[in-house]
Image: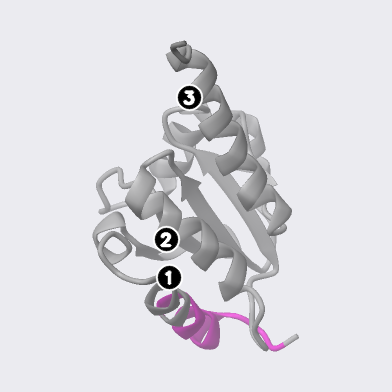
Amino acid sequence: MSMDFNFLMNDVVRQARQEITTAGYKELTTPEDVEDAFAQKGTTLVMINSVCGCAGGIARPAAAHSVHYDKRPDHLVTVFAGQDKDATEKARDFFEGYPPSSPSFALLKDGEFITMVERHEIEGHDPMSVVNKLQGYFDQYCEEL
């Protein structure tokens, strides 16, 4: 009995989406969603989600655990590379000087891009090292809760 590849991929995508939204991130699926979310006052953490097995399996848990901290972004949002292509492309327009990278994280403050954690800083690392990197940025740029 063979599995239908599309069914399997849809399940992987569904699980990846669910994992990040359960962690409190709002999905941005259109360019308009991205523009509205990125225009918000305060700090915004953007998780660029991906079905990439190894890096995604590190980035999603890091995204979930990093926000359990004294300082954290005001807004948590996500775009899904390879799935919500227009929204992802719109988000990447904001990350000047950085090539497309997924999974990855971007931090914005008052709509201005501040910094990025790229895939090469995720893949091959353990989730706690990514959590520590993100929380270091939270210490620098976010207000205490």
Amino acid at circle 3: Met
Q: Is residue 140 magenta?
A: yes
Circle 1 is placed at which residue position?
Answer: 127
Disc on the earlier residue, 1 or 2 = 2
| Place of residue 100 in the rendered image (x, y in percent of width and height, measured from the top left) | 30, 43
Q: Which residue is mark 3?
A: 9
Amino acid on which disc 2 is placed: Ile
Q: Identify which residue is drawn at 30% across, 69% down.
A: 125
Q: Main secondary structure of the magenta part?
A: helix
First along the sequence among labels 3 and 2? 3
Q: How far is the residue under mark 3 from the one under mark 2?
A: 19 Å
Q: Nearer the viewer, residue 35 or 48?
A: 48
Mark pair 1, 3: CA separation: 24 Å
Q: Which residue is mark 2?
A: 58
Q: Residues within 10 Å of mark 1 (few under 14, many from 20)?
A: many
97 horizontally vs 20: left or right: left
